[in-house]
Image (cartoon, helix red, strand yellow):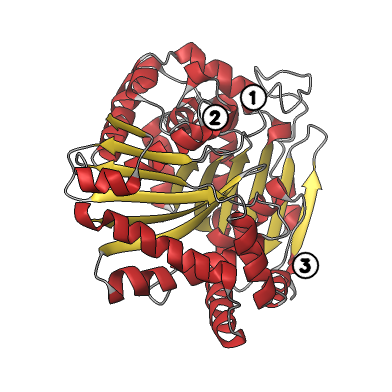
Amino acid sequence: MQLQKRFKKSVFGNGLTLLTERHPEFRSLSIGIWVKAGTRHEKSREAGVSHFLEHMLFKGTENRSALEIAREVDQVGGEFNAFTTREYTCFHIMLLSRDLDLGVDILSDILLNSKFDSEEMERERKVILQEIAMVEDSPEELVHDLFFEILYGRHGLGRPILGTETSIKRMRRSDLVRYFRKHYRPDQIIVSVAGNVSHESVRKKMKLLSRKFWPGRPHKKESRRQLGFEPAPHPKPGKWWIKRATEQVHLVWGVEGPKYSSRDRFATLLLNVYLGGGMSSSLFQEIREQKGLAYTVYSSLSPFYDSGIFSIYAATGMNQVPLCLKLIEECVAKLKKQLLSEEDLQVVKDNLKGTILLSSDNVESRMTSLAKNEIFFGKLFSVDEICHMIDEVCPHDIRRVARKLLSHGSRSILALGPKPSRSVVSKIRPSVLKNY
């Protein structure tokens, strides 16, 4: 059965979107509630509210306590979790297909009847503050948060997803409820289901969620700007050194990358795999295997609705920082100047397609793919279509994208580590040198 035939979509009268993809070969199913609200939709005084809400929707409804929610899922061997990003929030549950009713009922209950109990909120506030402390103790995570904050400034894409210690401590219940009622509304929600269930059977279970009005939600449709969406600024170029008592210097090198829907997205993904996508990548081979400068080095692509960042991370010793940055520039410059051989590009294509094909055998990955395609493209791209688009990329596309990424010569480089020596400062010449 082709995936296009397995896939179905319904949009209810209240604006709620239902996506399903039937996989009769599996006994399981994955249900995701995707809310088009994340860090970029928060006002500065609300920093971290999207993530705080993610926690609170597990903490009890008018019909179930937090323990009862956990116990009902555990009793059938299921898994219930959630995550928050800069552009959306997802609540996902994986169960056996026979437990469809339970999954839909729990997810409907938390969307429509969550209590936001004050005592639970105070307990969860402590948990989130511990999460923030964990990031503070993890230089690799911290340097990426600081990198986005520097590049995007006060824009929502620059704020840490967890919020700050200050914003979480002053968060009130009324802040959570107001944000919840504004954003958790049917026209801003996608229900994505993948597994051994039919579209009609899921659709019939949507009686509560397909109601015209949800409790406490505004009836009038609002624009994206009214919902907090502000166009992303161009990422800020420059060099920064933030002093922190760490054993290594944690480096992030970055340039502006393509947005999620860019026609260059597959060429950029392939460039990313070639540069820093694994142990055979050019950065890993050059910086770790050949020179022994770093244990961890990789590149990554962070696309958003209207912006994106292509970045490279490495952790190295103080005296190795200039050489490490020089090698990063050289690896990138090669792609800008020289064409990849057809053989090298085919290896990278097989790597990327293999990753996609392996993930397609997992219902949770399929559920995620359905939702993200709908959020950013408004349509489904099958695995076969994606593999075909990857195959169409040629060496000239890779070089064109490399030149486009590096066309202005601007870089954003952040170093997090001990106070740099004079010789390192003279070579790096950071414009900002401050304590954290």
Q: Quadrant of the N terminus?
A: bottom right
Residue at 80% across / 43% down in the picture?
Answer: 11
User: Cβ–Cβ below 8 Å for labels 1 and 2?
Assistant: yes
Horizontal and vertical percent for residue 189? Answer: 67, 37
Image quadrant assignment for residue 327: bottom left
Q: Is residue 350 above or below residue 19?
A: below
The residue that mark 2 highlights is: 156
Horizontal and vertical percent for residue 174? Answer: 50, 12
Q: Which of the pair 295/29 is nearer the observer?
A: 295
Residue at mark 1 to residue at mark 3: CA–CA distance: 34 Å
Residue at 46% across / 32% down in the picture?
Answer: 51
| 38 lies left or right of 20 | left
Q: Quadrant of the C terminus?
A: top left
| 258 lies left or right of 63 | right
Image quadrant assignment for residue 364: bottom right
Q: Amino acid at mark 3?
A: Gln
| 142 lies left or right of 338 | left
The residue that mark 3 highlights is: 4
Residue at 60% across / 49% down in the picture?
Answer: 408
**Which disc is residue 228 wearing?**
1
